[in-house]
Amino acid sequence: MTAIKAESLVKSYTTYKRGSGFKETVKSFFKREKVQINAVDDISFEIEKGSICGILGPNGAGKSTTIKMLCGALFPTSGSIDVMGFSPARDRMKYVQKIGAVFGQKSQLIWDIPPVDSFAMNKAIYGISDADYKKRLGEMTELFGVEEVIHKPTRVLSLGERMKCEFIMAMLHSPEIVFLDEPTIGLDVIAKNRIREAVSEMNRCGTTFILTTHDLEDVEQLADDVIIINHGKKVFDDTLTGLKNILGSKKIVTLTLTKPCTGDEINGARIIGRDNDFDISLEVDTEKQPITEFLKSLTDHVSFKDISVRELPMDMIITRIYSEGQNPLPPRWSVQQG
Amino acid sequence: MRYIRIFFTCINTAISKAAAYRLDFVLGNFITLLSNVIFPLVTVLIYANGAQFPGWTMWEVLLIQSVFSMSNALASMICGSVLWVTMDHIQSGSFETVLLKPLSPLFYIACANFDIESLGLFLGGLAMTIISASFTGISGGNGVIMFLLLFISGAAVMCGLELIMAAISFKWVGNSRIPEIFESIKEFGKYPIGIFPKAVQVMSSLIIPVAAVGFFPASALMGRLDMRSLISVLPCILFLLFGVWLYNRMIKNYEGVGG
């Protein structure tokens, strides 16, 4: 069942072009050239109810603008959004009652007082009954392990503790859809894992999550589907597995050789990393040559003392999609577009 | 009912926030009170040196200024933070945290930032009003009713001004100097209107009705109100409604900042 449907979404801004230096500054004081920027440029997608969808993209790609439009905080310049039958910006008051959002760089907690007081304010704002509030707060504080923390003033909490409290703030009213805009930014590994576990747990209970992040581990560990945006345009929309396969079924083989190697390839596989002439990494296309055959052939022709085989790292896939400007629209998307 | 519950929860939160920095709360109140007490002191000095506002005794002028302080404090408590909080949200691109609440953004900002620190000014103004009124005398019955009506209208003007300034900040980001213009306009409400030229009288009664902040309600209390002044209630209400409308209209201009 579709929870979110965005069609031909556009968000454009008008800004002014200004040169640098004294002369240009004075000139721009009297005459400025208007520049139209399409932060989001004709994007369409659908997100299934109960899924976790990761929205990826480099800085300035239009991820946050997209998520703000989905939250109802920004009006689209054109196009339409349907989230559970609501048009987010138009039906904002009713709509936001059913969603939650965590902005990694924007706090919803009140700085000078304990999070529990901020929660009490949300209780009143969302009209949560005393019994539901008590039950939900108990569940959430246990899930995030912050039973004691919520009674300390927000300003004395660590970033990780604060972020966990931000999640509780966003989840108290049991939203059906939660938007996470870079929720793990700046957190240590332990805090990240705790948050990821909590998101997985809440997702198992039926909450749909839409996640923008630069941390590919967030996507690898959480997301079912991935949308990639670059320069305001959608460049990818498929499952996580689909993303991993987008550059072909490739694997990385890392070798420690016993004899130095100075060439560009070994046994038909391209060398993609070289610490020195002994420690090298190869990219093996397993569609052309199954990995077992490659390893057998490698053993026969090359002398090495250590070997490891791993998947193509996500960051490599993403970097290639960003930098090569590939437009590998999957069949699902192509069908929608007719 | 829900909005009333939210309002009181926010008051509770505002008190908690103020209590977090107790010394700051006490000192803040004291400094606000002091700076507003110094202003009437100028009036006292003027009269002590033999000068005066023609047709008005010192206590009558002090009553106008006391009522102005009370009205100013009431407006500050309700929507005094709206301008700065809105400006801050727009500059930092965090206004979406406001739009995520299932409430009118204006109501949420006003409640969540209820300025409990203006309570000291309100109580100071109230004390000065009582003292001044004890010297000028109070017109009974209708005078008190008209005072209350005009006092509320005056607070509405102040709130309207705040909202218009806040609304402008959606388009003119970081306009920290705009409040200075409005602060200057508000000054006209602190004096007997008759001392100003006709054009200023019309402006401060009907166009930007700041005379309703101090002068009209105080005049009603003293029984010196020109009944024609009651017409200023209408522009006062319109001023507030315009402020609310403009603020809500300008929200559509919110663009956020780069993520």
Image (tube, rainbow, N blue to C red):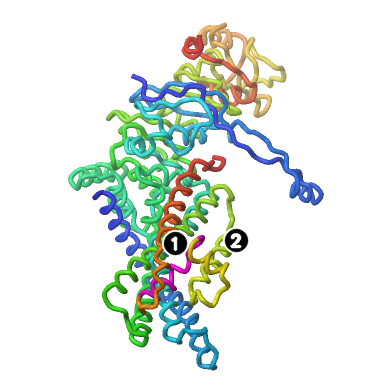
Question: Considering depth in this image, is B102 or B122 the residue closer to the camera?
Answer: B122
Quarter of the rendering containing residue A298: top right
Q: Which mark is residue B177?
A: 2
- Is residue B122 depicted above or below A305 in this figure? below
Amino acid type, callout 2: Arg
Question: Considering depth in this image, is B106 or A18 the residue closer to the camera?
Answer: B106
Q: Quadrant of the N terminus of chain A?
A: top left
Residue at (48%, 48%) from the top-left corner? B246
Q: Is any part of residue B121 visible from this angle?
A: no
- Secondary structure mostly seen in magenta is helix
Mark 1 belongs to chain: B
Q: Is residue A35 magenta?
A: no
- Is residue A25 depicted above or below A301 in this figure? below
Question: Considering depth in this image, is B192 or A311 the residue closer to the camera?
Answer: B192
Tell me where residue B214 appears, x and y as whole percent.
43, 72
SS at circle 2: loop
Q: Which mark is residue A22?
A: none
Quarter of the rendering containing residue B195: bottom right
Q: Residue lying at the far bottom in this picture: please name it.
A: B49
Q: Is any part of residue B242 visible from this angle?
A: yes
Write down the residue under mark 1. B157
Q: Earlier in the sequence, mark 1 or mark 2?
A: 1
Q: Is residue B208 magenta?
A: yes
Amino acid type, callout 1: Val
Mark 2 belongs to chain: B
